[in-house]
Image (cartoon, helix red, strand yellow):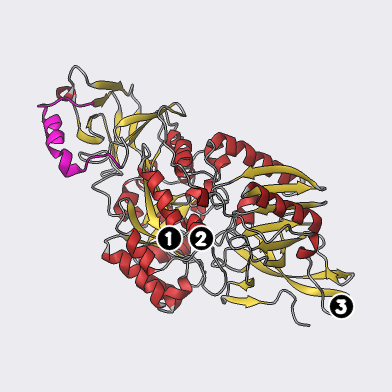
Amino acid sequence: MTPETLPSWPDVAPDLIAVATGRQPAETVIRGGRVVLVQTREVLDWQIAIIQGRFAYVGPDASHCIGPDTEVIEADGRYVIPGLCDAHMHVESGMLTPAEFAAAVIPHGTTTMFADPHEIANVLGLPGVRLMHDEARGLPCSMFMQMPSCAPSAPGLETTGHEIGPDEVAEAMTWPGIVGLGEMMNFPGVIAGDPKMLAEMAATVRAGATIGGHYASPDLGPAFHGYAAGGPADDHEGTCEADAVARVRQGMRAMMRLGSAWYDVKAQITAITERGLDPRGFILCTDDCMAATLVDDGHMNRVYRHAVECGCDPLVALQMCTITTAAHFGLERELGSIAPGRRADLILTSDLRTLPVERVLALGRTVAKDGAMVVECPHLDWPAPARLTVKLAGDLTADRFEVAAPEGAQNVRARVIGVVENQAPTKALSRDLPVRDGLVEPEGDTCHIALVERHRGTGGVTNAFVSGFGYRGRMAMASTVAHDSHHMIVVGTSRADMALAANRLAEVGGGVTFWADGAERALVELPIAGLMSDRPAAEIAARAQDLMAAMRDAGCTLNNAYMQHSLLALVVIPELRISDLGLVDVRDFTLTDLIEAT
């Protein structure tokens, strides 16, 4: 069973009724378990009957639903909980295609995902979104897509491979499996009443879909109220309790994320655990998870456990990644709870606090047992245009990464991007840097950073400086994952190694590479749009672990520093970023000079 073949509730209603009343045997019955009803926050010794991918009977005794061919699953006293839902995530951040991402997270109990493929939209436009959508429709779980809203994320401050506008949004809203508009990152545009942003949101509302939010500003004054008035229904950019409270008070849902590098649950969940606010206004999500996190630590089960460790009642935490998520997208009658007619997605677990995932059913059939998939996740045949996306204007040389000093200067005061561990925002720093032979040279914890245009082969290179990684010695790291424009970001202490790293990614068609002392130390090949691989998650996770080990060997001690590296070009999150057009001060959304005036 897949979302493409799952019959609708009305179509299967005669069979559901017949099974529930005992006139027809169920395909599957689960008994001997403790059923968790998230709709009432009860745990009952009930039984479950399933037919055609949907729950037919949920009650005290399903013996009347059992026939000679019914599969009977003995729960043996374990809890039976709804499959977990991720309300906001990006498949591409896992470095995996939808099929491989699903294969990685289903064994962890995630049976529904709401994915915003705005990474591939920036590279391939609407055709790329369609490819993601089509592969998702053939999976043995539910992966809904949100149509990306902002490509570019900040018009006038970056150039993307393709642009998205109201016409593309309106077209996507007609596709099956599109449930909303992806995060509206251009919050200044919404606040200013930009016609393009308003038209995209209007097309979404007319389609009866949900507008995703992204308000990456600490300002909770009139600008925030204007953004809420524009229509976004949720926001995942909160980093403290005040952010969460402000959002739910405006009728938005506060999405609290725990990704590979974003740790925002603990600071916000106190709005529920200490202030006692209604948990229906809060949702748990991941946003960005690397393959290594998915393989080694988990997915939504990891977020759930973390919320419980932060003092949240397990049943409340479970609501925030099941029924509340479903209700948010208008799908409460379709999924998110164990109740008649809903998609038969469930987990068998022996403990509600640590949540070991022992068996997973999705769309009515067993898809994973004891941490391993037992069914296949079919792949799309990704076409050549999706695999040939790294275009450079010939090989890069070390001199392309030079920063010339003002005439006669012995040192300069430079603007420097400051990385913040476990946070998406950066700091706008100033550093005094020396000048040697007419060139500005980084020193101490400051490194070179460059953004290399890779969509059209223009030969453009923007140079700047970054601090916070802790690198030492001669090194360089290059990546075609560079949210959200996804040009190529290169960070290094050696311009020669930066050139080697950049040219290597052009050679392999995209990915992430790390070099030290003139030799490649790690490579993660991502040939699909320069963002994803269709290799198994465990293989990509192992390569990502090699990458992070190489980063540590070069002196970087940050938690999951790759994620910070990949966001250095995200020109909608404060404070300082780099783009193909220059250095961007996101505090006022302007291009700014690298060298400060003296």
Q: Are marks 1 and 2 in contact (CB under 8 Å)?
A: yes
| Residue 359 location, quadrant | top left
Q: Secondary structure at mark 3?
A: loop
Q: Amino acid at mark 3?
A: Ala
Pointer 1 residue: 148
Q: Quadrant of the C terminus?
A: bottom right
Q: Residues within 10 Å of mark 2 (few under 14, many from 20)?
A: many
Numbered circle sitting on residue 398: none
Pointer 3 residue: 409
Residue 498: where, in percent of width, then height? 75, 56
- Whichever of labels 1 and 2 marks the residue nearer the N terminus, that label is 2
Q: Is residue 91 left or right of residue 562?
A: left
Query: Residue placed at 59% from the left, 63% from the top?
Result: 456
Pointer 2 residue: 122
Please state the extent of the stretch shown in magenta in the rendering. 4-27
Label 3 – label 1 distance at C-alpha: 46 Å
Q: Nearer the viewer, mark 3 or mark 1?
A: 1
Residue 59 belongs to magenta span = no
Label 2 – label 3 distance at C-alpha: 39 Å
From the viewer's side, name the closer residue of 115 and 256: 115
